[in-house]
DNA sequence: CTGTTAGCGCCTTCAA
DNA sequence: TTGAAGGCGCTAACAG
């Protein structure tokens, strides 16, 4: 990587590097028109591009913002990433991407790498984990973040604070009302049916999942219903699919029992998958087993992933402003938002669609 | 951003910065065990993190790889990004993300920004455009890329070369057989039906779209069929939806004519949307107009987007190894792949599913 | 307003 | 093997 330098430009323009710097890159001082013109001409005749590394070194700031996600191909993270990217652009920064599959140890590495690059701020988008196997990783991550913040870095975490993180200057948490929204979803669903509820959750210890499970149970309780059974599985499409297979077997067994008169009319199952992708997986499983939604079972998800909106039957879910969350987190970490004191909170809303539509249960409607 | 420096570590360990550097960061020379130990201890007692900017400045290389996409939230790009990210990780590099909505002018900016950061290589994933309004932007982009390459940068472009780019050292194009695959798709579809074909394409001038349209027409011609009508619209879900609305009207009109005996039996329509997202949009439009697929019309897409696989009716499409494409491009740009001479080409394959299943046309099957 | 002088933190010859 | 010195490209004080 060889390129013309500021010094070369300056020489060609017959001025000092300092002057060239002043005209080419922002500075409080404004050089004379004639000189400025000369420098600018020299600059683009040489195709000069400032060396951001050198600038960063000199100013000790990089114009970089680090983004940590579990998986950039997951539509949930992709949507957040879009928001982050947008906000970064507004701030005139670039985003550095790191994917970690949710492993705190990897996240720690990513933070260290961002710190090494002197990223101005870091946005952590993936769900926090309190699983025992992540304990050590979490501690290291917390330590790394702490150091980063002490060195003047800004951090914004989506959802929950990093386990063990000591609150310090420059550490912001963008709370997502997962629990409340899940509770609302539960009560709206419970209000109009007599179903048997089952929750398909992620691994225990994953905050986002746990919150949603807890909230849903709370909503059920508030409606005077017993707690739902919780099936723990992977926090992704295939996890949902597996759980769906198991549930399908159960549903079919119940149908069979019912048909043979062995048991009284079995209650229908209403499935709550803690995210849309899992819900889609579960729905696919039911369908592959010959069951139909909402006829044989109803189902709801969480997130309201855009790409999944055209899925049929339309998935009942909880809308989350993913892109906005990304933007907010980024702004928060930039200190741009003075509203750090009273940050505009993230809000979502329950969106009931056909996948939980009772009126359709009688008729076969895929 | 204040952090402990190599000098501090060296002082604490009682050695020279040079030695500390040799211990902490890779070097040919290996310092003595005892000394090395001392340095390492000093380093992490101070929480030393090397300043990548300074390292980059000194070595003039950054460990950065720039990725340019239209929109990171688009599942097509998200999938490619995953591959890029993976390959970058293998190479021990980090990825810098830029989104441009496909505007060459923005892409030029992005390249300049990457160059400023001294990115080791750049991967451009978005479709190239030859639209008149992009002419100037393309020229600038080509110039910028050329300069970047001349300065030692490596560039890999997915699909087509940038319009006007003069082939230079370090400029790689990862060809995607869009045309061939589209032709194959057309012939496979044509082989088993007597439908009236309609193509929903992106704006004229978008290479990826144009290639697929051309290929499809070629396949039709090879099957002895007349060229299909092409509807030009946005290269995204809403473009597909709009086109779908128009087609739905036409289909319904034909049905009405048929019912009233005004016309003879109208032939069914087989829609080819140049990408999956557009196909889904079109399908949604038909559905919202009360039409069913494949009963009232069949439809096929292109890309085989993972998130869309659970869509019903399952979408016929052309599978593209998106993630692998991202990986390959990244490797190519790293010079890692000696196979630049005989690079393993990208291959895809036609995947026919229910959305074009003729046997289902008689029965209503969503 | 312009030029000069120091570094920013690190790597890399070159001597020792 | 280790240390000393110079420079990567730029900015920020300080003179003039």
Image (cartoon, coloured by chain):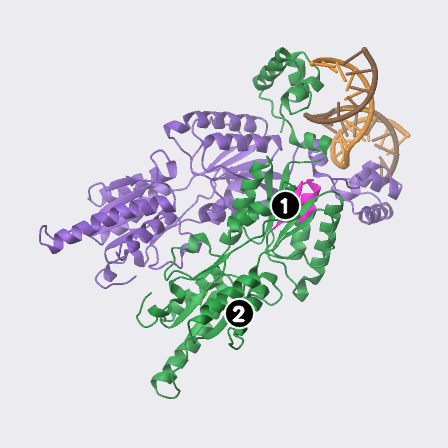
Chain colours: A purple, B green, C brown, D orange
| Residue at 46% in and 31% down | A104
> Tag on residue B339?
1
Query: Does C16 appear above or below B210?
Result: above
Please identify the quadrant where the N terminus of chain B is shown. Answer: top right
Image coordinates for residue B120, horizontal then vertical, percent: 67, 40
- The chain holding disc 2 is B
Image coordinates for residue A169, horizontal then vertical, percent: 53, 29
Q: Please state the extent of the stretch shown in magenta in the rendering.
A: B111-124
Image coordinates for residue B116, horizontal then vertical, percent: 70, 42
Query: Does A346 appear above or below B93?
Result: below
Image coordinates for residue A49, horizontal then vertical, percent: 75, 44
State the count of labels.
2
Left or right, B246 with respect to B217, comes to left
Residue A110 is covered by the magenta coloring: no
- Helix, strand or loop at label 2? It is helix
| Residue at 42% in and 73% down | B193
Left or right, B293 with respect to B91, comes to left
Q: Nearer the viewer, residue B74 or A289?
A: A289
Q: Nearer the viewer, residue A120 or B92?
A: B92
- The chain holding disc 1 is B
Residue B113 is covered by the magenta coloring: yes
Q: Residues within 10 Å of mark 2 (few under 14, many from 20)?
A: many
Query: Does A239 appear above or below B173?
Result: above
Is residue B324 in view? Answer: yes
Q: Residues within 10 Å of mark 1 (few under 14, many from 20)?
A: few
Residue named by callout 2 = B219
In the figure, residue A294 lies in which quadrant? bottom left
Asked whether disc 2 touches disc 1, contact meaning CB atoms under 8 Å apart, the reply is no
Left or right, B333 with respect to B359, comes to right
Circles 2 and 1 on the same chain: yes
Is residue A335 in view? Answer: no
Please identify the quadrant where the C terminus of chain B is shown. Answer: bottom left
């Amino acid at each position: 990587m060889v390129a013309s330098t500021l010094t070369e430009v300056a020489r060609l323009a017959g001025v000092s590097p300092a002057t060239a710097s002043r005209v080419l890159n922002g500075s409080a001082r404004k050089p004379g028109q004639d000189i400025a013109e000369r420098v600018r001409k020299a600059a683009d005749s040489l195709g000069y591009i400032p060396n951001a590394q050198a600038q960063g070194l000199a100013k000790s700031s990089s114009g970089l913002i680090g983004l940590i996600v579990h998986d950039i191909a997951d539509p949930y993270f992709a949507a957040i990433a879009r928001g982050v990217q947008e906000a970064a652009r507004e701030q005139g920064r670039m985003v550095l991407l790191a994917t970690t599959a949710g492993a705190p140890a990897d996240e720690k590495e990513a933070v260290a790498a961002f710190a090494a690059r002197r990223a101005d701020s870091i946005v952590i988008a993936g769900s926090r984990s309190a699983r025992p196997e992540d304990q050590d990783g979490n501690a290291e991550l917390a330590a790394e973040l702490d150091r980063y913040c002490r060195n003047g870095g800004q951090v914004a975490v989506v959802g929950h604070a990093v386990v063990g993180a000591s609150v310090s200057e420059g550490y912001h948490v963008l709370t997502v009302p997962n629990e409340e929204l899940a509770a609302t979803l539960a009560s709206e669903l419970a209000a109009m049916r007599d179903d048997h509820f089952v929750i398909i959750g992620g691994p225990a210890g994953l905050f986002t999942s746990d919150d949603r499970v807890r909230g849903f149970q709370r909503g059920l309780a508030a409606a005077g219903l017993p707690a739902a059974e919780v099936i723990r599985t992977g926090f992704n499409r295939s996890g949902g699919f597996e759980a769906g297979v198991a549930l399908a077997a159960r549903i079919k067994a119940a149908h069979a029992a019912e048909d043979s008169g062995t048991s009284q009319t079995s209650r229908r199952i209403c499935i709550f998958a803690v995210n849309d992708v899992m819900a889609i997986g579960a729905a696919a499983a039911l369908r592959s087993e010959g069951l139909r939604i909402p006829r044989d079972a109803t189902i709801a998800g969480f997130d309201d992933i855009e790409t999944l909106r055209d899925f049929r039957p339309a998935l009942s879910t909880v809308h989350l402003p993913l892109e906005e969350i990304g933007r907010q987190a980024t702004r928060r970490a930039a200190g741009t938002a003075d509203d750090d004191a009273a940050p505009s909170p993230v809000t979502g809303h329950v969106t009931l669609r056909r996948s939980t539509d009772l009126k359709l249960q009688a008729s076969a409607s895929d």
